[in-house]
Amino acid sequence: DAGVTQSPTHLIKTRGQHVTLRCSPISGHKSVSWYQQVLGQGPQFIFQYYEKEERGRGNFPDRFSARQFPNYSSELNVNALLLGDSALYLCASSSWDRGQETQYFGPGTRLLVL
Amino acid sequence: AQSVTQLDSHVSVSEGTPVLLRCNYSSSYSPSLFWYVQHPNKGLQLLLKYTSAATLVKGINGFEAEFKKSETSFHLTKPSAHMSDAAEYFCVVSDQLTGGGNKLTFGTGTQLKVEL
């Protein structure tokens, strides 16, 4: 079975530009989460979506937004890019088993802002 | 909010010797705990998860972790290290979101180096 897929794999942008990152969950998974991993640190939670509704948002500015589509794929949008937005952006989809959620991660999109 | 603390930022072992990566958690109730591994320039792979069904959890590639409530610990072990185990390991706790679902809170990571 295919895992979580993300596109593009790498991206270079300049300050002030806008970027859209895409994620397709594992087949059958209805929830998608986004995380930002800055070099040398652990991932930080940005958003979770379930059935197209936002379930939660981490401590990120309004420049960050996301949405989920009827096929459960998701987009992460970042406006007015800053140098500090350079990071690996990870998408995860979730399965549930006996009341416990497990998140499975994609390979990530590496964003470099110049 | 729940949190995890990884006690070692770097661990170095020889191939064939045991691995111990230490993690303590802070939680007001029975936590959901995970270990993920990240190889260089790769995404995160789930190693194992604590489900409260058993305190000793077996994962992939020979790793296991023991949940000890009295010590608030969830240390990751492997009897014999292999060169392919060299990677960054994250101890993770799951936190409930107000809208349902959960967010993952990651520790700072432990870089495992395996030497010949």
Image (cartoon, coloured by chain):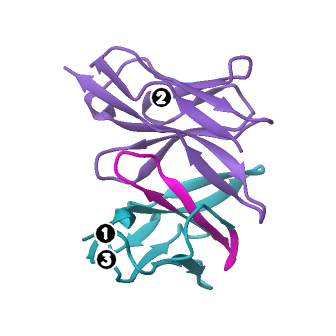
Chain colours: A cyan, B purple
Residue of label 2: B63
Q: Secondary structure at mark 2?
A: loop
Give percent across and percent down for residue A43: 48, 52
Residue of label 1: A9
Image quadrant assignment for residue A56: bottom right
Q: Which residues are magenta?
A: A35-55
Q: Which residue appears farthest toward the top when viewing the image?
A: B17
Give amino acid for label 3: Arg
Give percent across and percent down for residue B99: 77, 66
Give percent across and percent down for residue B40: 29, 46
Res A94 seen here: yes
Judge whether residue B60 is colored magenta.
no
- Are the residues flagged by discs 1 and 2 in contact, CB closer than 8 Å? no
Residue of label 3: A15
* Crowd class of label 3 (few under 14; some 14 to 19; many from 20; radius 10 Å): some
Question: Is residue B86 rendered to the left or right of residue B59?
Answer: left
Question: Is residue A15 rendered to the left or right of residue A90?
Answer: left
* Crowd class of label 2 (few under 14; some 14 to 19; many from 20; radius 10 Å): many
Q: Say whether disc 1 or disc 3 marks the residue closer to the N-terminus.
A: 1
Choose between B42 and B81: the one closer to the eye: B42
Give amino acid for label 1: Thr
Choose between A103 and A36: the one closer to the eye: A36
